[in-house]
Image: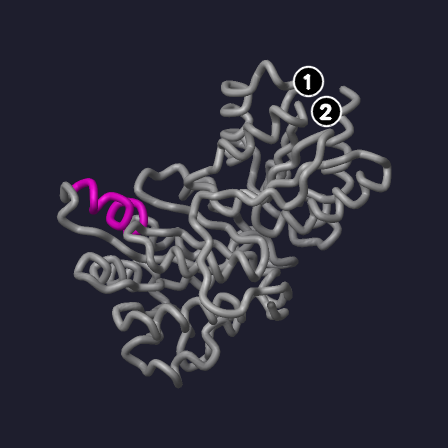
Amino acid sequence: MREIAFREALREAMQEEMRANDRVFLLGEEVAEYNGAYKVSQGMLEEFGEKRVIDTPIAELGFAGIAVGAAMNGLRPICEFMTFNFSLVAIDQVINSAAKINSMSDGQFLCPIVFRGPTGSAGQLAQQHSQNFENWYANTPGLKVVVPSNPADAKGLLKSAIRDENPVIFMESEQMYGFKGMVPEGEYTIPIGVANVVKEGTDVTIVSFGKMMLRCYDAVAALEAEGINVELIDLRTVRPIDYDTVITSVKKTNRLVVVEEAWPLASISSEISHIVQRRAFDYLDAPVHRVTSMDTNLPYAPTFVEAYLPNVERIVKAVKSVLYKL
């Protein structure tokens, strides 16, 4: 094990897969000469050359279409969006081509492609650069959606995504590229669709994913200081969702709080709440509580940004509300 940054873990995953399989290549805005907008692809142009690390114009619909066509013809593209906010320009290729070509062709065409890049808020970037689209893409059959919360998971899950025969949406927090964590030496993968029970507990279950796991760690520490024993689950992927792990936990703790960065309407937390009340209703001692971003466009002022996002205070309050029915 060694401690490396989130961006380094992602780079290692891409490098290892590109060394092992010459059909894997990376394309996107500034991924080559500039070493990536967030330096994720630093040094990759020098190692793999301009035919496998490709700078594209600022034309997401165009280069996403090129990547989908390449995947249909046997290559394995990694298509980087500078931010998933810009993926909206390319969403026709993602939803109507990549996600559907296997089904529409009756299995004659596969689309082994990874669309990856930063998601969510990153401080004062305002409304058009701070949105979460995990639930949008998770709504689409044919896609898998991965949202890692730490460097070790990021590397293992990205390697699995690159090897997958299906299109994978791989979303990385823009604020976590410099976040460091312990990552195993050598070859390893993490299966898509398997949640991680980060901490076992008995009083309440908290489910989250991505950057919000960091807020949950702080909330769990504050709750533990008050004698509240939390079971914490990192979903890792939001399509498919590992419902069984969540249900097993709820049957033990009898209470559930779901934390996510997206807006509340039609969110991942809404889906989990529905499944839990359907499959584990008799085990619940309190209604499921959600903690999401506020149902408004993200403000610019830093004080408003903090109030907009899920924070430790709101998570702690939600846990106490399901424990004490406040």
Which quadrant of the figure contains the N terminus? bottom right
Q: Measured along the vertical axis of the image, is residue 256 above or below residue 306? A: above
Quarter of the image for residue 288 reads top right
> At label 1, which amino acid type do we have?
Asp
> Does 70 sit above or below residue 244?
below
Asked if marks 2 and 1 touch (Cβ < 8 Å), the reply is: yes
Label whose residue precedes the other's in the sequence (2 or 1) = 1
The answer to whether residue 271 is left or right of residue 2 is: left
Residue position marked by numbered label 2 in the rendering: 322
Q: Quadrant of residue 123?
A: bottom right
Of the pair 39 and 207, the residue shown nearer to us: 207
Q: Is residue 19 visible?
A: yes
What kind of element bears circle 2? Answer: helix
User: Considering depth in this image, is 216 or 39 the residue closer to the camera?
Assistant: 216
Q: Residue at x 49, y 71 (%)?
A: 40
- Which residue is most to the bottom? 46
The image shows residue 297 at horizontal and vertical percentages of 58, 44
Residue 291 versus residue 209 in the image, above or below: above
Residue toward you, 313 or 294: 313
Q: Disc 2 residue type?
A: Val
Disc 1: which residue? 285
- Which region shows up in magenta? 93-104
| Of residues 66 and 160, the one drawn nearer to the viewer in this rendering | 160
